Amino acid sequence: MKEDINLNNLEEFLPQSLPPESRAKVKTLFYKSLALKMHRFYGGKIAVMPKAGIFDINWFNVWYTPGVSAVSTAIRDNNDISFDLSNRANAVAVVSDSTRVLGDGDCTPAGGLGVMEGKAMLMKYLGGIDATALCINSRGADGKPSADKIIDFVKMCAPTFGAINLEDISQPNCYKALDVLRAACDIPVWHDDAQGTACVTIAGLINALELAGKNIKNIKIILYGSGAANTTIAKFLILMGADAGKIIMFDSKSSLRKNREDLKNRPDAYKQWELCQITNKENLQTQEEAFKNADVLIALSKPGPDTIKPQWIKMMAAKSIVFVCANPVPEIYPESAKQAGAYIVATGRGDFPNQVNNALCFPGILKGVLLCRAKTITDSMALIAAKAIAKRARDIGINENNILPLMTDVEVYALQAAEVAQAAQKEGVARIKISYEEAYNKAKEDIFKAQNLTAELMQNGFIKTPPASLIKETLEEALKNL
């Protein structure tokens, strides 16, 4: 095997005889193993550094005592000045109790640090935002995770930040925390697992429907999985004009419908019970009934590859659209879904076509609300971001294997930031006025600054390059363990 292996040419180092599903499994093993080695190599992936100059020793008198006393008293007299005199205007807290980390479940309070640092890294690199990972212990006296503890924590730390990103919190605490905090806080509170996933999914679906020649008002939609993501997707679909009666959602037991008495009066299932009342007007119960002539499948459920059966997809309507977004393994592999008749297939993985990735939206949306110092993120603002993402993809050029922009497309984040900032002002939730051009240019400037700084740190050796031999060794291990 060559020594010059890197993540861009990884495919070249996989045996050509490996079938697609085996290639996907190898890459899953490889990325997981490499992640452990790289996080140990760097000691995590986020650091803090000054953005103001220290030109000589006397500048400490300006940045700290005695000079900084004037900053404290100015903010005391007008808290909104904190956005001008501190980094608050560009600061986001990524808050998690680590009770539902990716597909791994409860990982203990510290277990989410890798993901939350990852979110912070993406916010900086893709949005020019300074984000802080805050993993908290939300357990009460009974040892169970408490939504109230999450709510209290966010309320207490809110004065430091311009926005809050909730992440990897189990049901129903994720719902309660978001609903309460959106109403109680005077800064935006965003739940990326729910709102972020819904935003990017809707963006991809807009373009998939255009390619398939289908109208959202007339289609039959299956939502497989009833967690925070799909319940929010259902809400966004209805806001986009989908017929609620033609949406059929499945949880781990059956379809959601009016006679699901097991969900009634359950405090951990109130979102699902609400959907039971307005969706699935034909009271369909089985997968076979639901998939027959369905136009769209959006699965965010148990990792596959056998969660979604090929025979179900064969029953779907012509030019069916299949989003199978469980991680690390989709509910069905794209090749199998295509063989079963799917027209467009999207997953949550970057090594397959049409990746549905929250990172396409949260840096741009959060940048937009920070630029106008918004007090909240409304659902309509999230949908405006989804439309901006979809339009950017169309401007580049869409086809069955390209319905969304790539994460490396700086333009998509700047466009979202500008659109969201304008929407916030129109809805009366912005503290300051900023024009479309100003928001767009500032977002782009900050993103390029973050990316250029990272490049300089790499070029000058402050960020070390991992040895190619380590990457090669990790791939060989993954191939052996297949």
Image: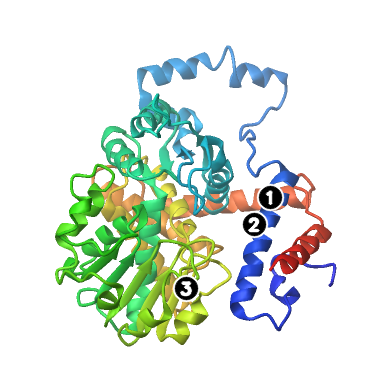
| Nearer to us in this view, 56 or 112 | 112
Q: Position of residue 35 (x, y in %)?
A: 67, 53
Q: Amino acid at mark 2?
A: Lys
Q: Secondary structure at mark 1?
A: helix
Cα gap from disc 2 to disc 1, whole angstroms: 7 Å
The answer to which image quadrant residue 477 occupies is bottom right
Kindly tell me whether residue 437 is visible in this rendering. no
Q: Position of residue 344 (x, y in %)?
A: 42, 80
**Residue type highlighted by circle 1:** Leu
Alpha-carbon neighbours of circle 2 within 10 Å: few (<14), some, or many (≥20)? few
Q: What residue is shown with label 3?
A: 332
Query: Dividing the image into 4 quarters, which one contains the C terminus?
Result: bottom right
Where does label 2 land, which residue? 32
Q: From the image, tell me which residue sits under label 1.
A: 36
Label 1 crowding class (10 Å Cα cut-off): few <14, some 14-19, many 20+? few
Mark toward the viewer: 3 or 1: 3
Up the image or down, 68 lies above or below 173; here it is: above
Visible residue check, residue 46: yes
Q: Position of residue 200 (x, y in %)?
A: 40, 62
Quarter containing the N terminus = bottom right
Distance Cα–Cα, label 3 vs label 1: 26 Å
Q: Position of residue 17 (x, y in %)?
A: 70, 83
Q: Is there CB contact under 8 Å for labels 3 and 1? A: no
**Are discs 2 and 1 less than 8 Å apart at CB?**
yes
Closer to the camera in the image, 185 or 264 = 264
Left or right: where does residue 54 sit relative to residue 272? right
The residue under the point 39% across, 70% down is 204
Q: Secondary structure at mark 3?
A: loop
Between discs 3 and 1, the one toward the N terminus: 1
